[in-house]
């Protein structure tokens, strides 16, 4: 907006300007809110920005594949994806209520806005030989237009970081022993936290409520931990090694260690545990060796007795024999392939440039499979994530996408998740490394 136009708009009475802004399309109104402080105050004060601009629907999944530079986007049938953009170089690290965290900063595909983050300050209290930090995004547009990025440490597995230190002739055995015996996580726990309100990183000290997860040496694990997080009711839940969860209060500078259910502790390293948000709040799930899908929800009503409660235990073994019927098709964008063919992967267009499909996917219609049906030639199931607003778990088996309805035990076939020409790139190493459900949001300070 030029200076002359800015001065002219300032001459309008608030009632007149509000009447004009009410006629603006929702996405345009969200953009107007970011134009200047006076417009933002007017839009917020008159409540012109409707609740439907908040994240309330699932548009699809960002899928991160081994050996591929870009994330692929799996679009839900009927999702309105017009205008969504994602820069070509984006590497999705986290997603929270419509905002995407990548290596360079935070971006909003719905509005096309992006904010670059400065490098966080080092934390000398945690030696890099033993710990690695992962960034996690906390954003709830219903509470505040501002977001925070938490840099949360994780203990390196002994087979890599700590094992290499112990085998190094130059390493001090006394130091290694002291670190291994130290309490984890410590209290207080000092984290680097970026706030969009201040525009800078700050060191914040969080005091632990309750017990620690154990010692650093206790954090040995064999299975890969998907570094997922969930923002829910004023707290950030972060999945960590040995399948414990950080519950970091966003307001009180405290944290709590939530240990996994006993069933998960007993099978440590034998199955990949997934953390996510769904209809009832924070969920974790895993599939055991007998193909039982086990799902727990987190009970945070009693502050002194926060714990997991098992909600579902579903037998998936019967799904290994049937043939799926295909109705509503989910669309895999194939961004990595299209960038070499002048398609949606061009630099200017970004990698999200999909048109919405005419057929809406309805989890309650007949576009699903019963448990008497199954999938021929499949070897096992891997959890992709949760539907944020319905009790649905998304799975894949041999790169075939599935949506499993927990309440009805019915199955939706999402179609093929194998990117075009992926075999030429990955060969036998082909796999989905991570998945993030995407819920568009047209609000925020970006």
Image (tube, rainbow, N blue to C red):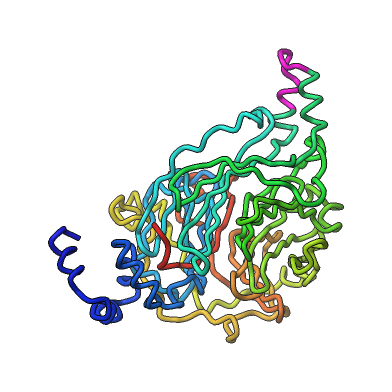
Position of residue 101 relative to residue 403, above or below, is above
Considering the image in quadrants, where does the C terminus appear? bottom left
- Residue 25 lies in the magenta-colored region: no
**Where's residue 343, x and y in %?**
32, 57
For residue 81, say whether it is visible.
yes
Quadrant in which the N terminus is drawn: bottom left
Tally the numbered discs.
0
Relative to 236, 53 lies left or right: left
**Which stretch did the figure color magenta?**
163-172
Residue displayed at 39% across by 64% down: 110
Snapshot quadrant of residue 357: bottom left
- Vertically, is 45 above or below 135? below
Q: Is residue 164 magenta?
A: yes
Comparing 328 with 233, the one in front is 233
Tell me residue 46's x, y (percent).
37, 78
* Left or right of residue 310, residue 148 in this image: left
Residue at 77% x, 55% y is 258
């Amino acid at each position: 907006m030029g200076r002359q136009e800015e001065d002219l708009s300032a001459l309008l009475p608030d009632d007149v300007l509000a009447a004009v802004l009410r006629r603006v399309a929702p996405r345009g109104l969200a953009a107007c809110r970011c134009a200047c402080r006076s417009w933002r105050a007017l839009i917020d004060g008159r409540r012109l920005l409707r609740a439907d601009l908040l994240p309330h629907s699932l548009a699809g999944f960002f899928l991160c594949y081994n050996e591929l530079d870009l994330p692929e986007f799996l679009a839900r049938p009927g999702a309105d994806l017009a205008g969504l953009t994602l820069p070509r170089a984006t590497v999705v690290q986290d997603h929270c209520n419509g905002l995407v965290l990548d290596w360079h900063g935070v971006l909003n595909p719905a509005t096309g806005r992006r904010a670059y983050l400065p490098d966080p300050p080092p934390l000398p209290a945690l030696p890099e030989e033993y710990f690695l930090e992962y960034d996690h995004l906390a954003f709830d547009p219903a509470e505040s237009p501002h977001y925070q990025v938490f840099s949360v440490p994780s203990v390196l597995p002994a087979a890599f970081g700590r094992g290499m230190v112990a085998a190094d002739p130059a390493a001090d055995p006394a130091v290694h022993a002291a670190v291994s015996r130290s309490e984890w996580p410590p209290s207080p726990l000092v984290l680097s936290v970026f706030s969009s309100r201040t525009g800078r990183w700050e060191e914040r000290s969080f005091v632990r409520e309750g017990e620690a997860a154990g010692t650093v040496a206790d954090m040995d694990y064999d299975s890969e931990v998907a570094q997922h997080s969930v923002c829910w009711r004023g707290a950030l839940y972060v999945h960590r090694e040995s399948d414990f969860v950080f519950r970091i209060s966003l307001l009180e500078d405290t944290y709590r260690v939530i240990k996994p259910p006993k069933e998960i502790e007993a099978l440590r390293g034998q199955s990949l545990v997934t953390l996510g948000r769904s209809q009832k709040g924070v969920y974790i799930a895993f599939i055991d060796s007998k193909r039982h899908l086990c799902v727990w929800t987190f009970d945070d009503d009693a502050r002194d007795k926060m714990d997991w409660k098992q909600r579902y235990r579903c037998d998936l073994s019967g799904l290994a024999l049937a043939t799926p019927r295909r109705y509503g098709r989910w669309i895999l964008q194939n961004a990595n392939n299209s960038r070499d063919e002048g398609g949606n992967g061009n630099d200017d267009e970004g990698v999200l440039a999909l048109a919405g499909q005419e057929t809406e996917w309805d989890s309650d219609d007949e576009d699903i499979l019963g448990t008497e049906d199954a999938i021929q030639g499949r070897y096992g199931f891997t959890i992709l994530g949760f539907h944020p607003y319905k009790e649905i778990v998304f799975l894949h088996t041999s790169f075939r996408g599935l949506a499993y309805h927990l309440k009805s035990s019915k199955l939706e076939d999402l179609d093929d998740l194998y990117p075009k020409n992926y075999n030429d790139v990955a060969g036998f190493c082909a796999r989905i490394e991570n998945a993030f459900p995407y819920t568009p949001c047209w609000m925020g300070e970006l």
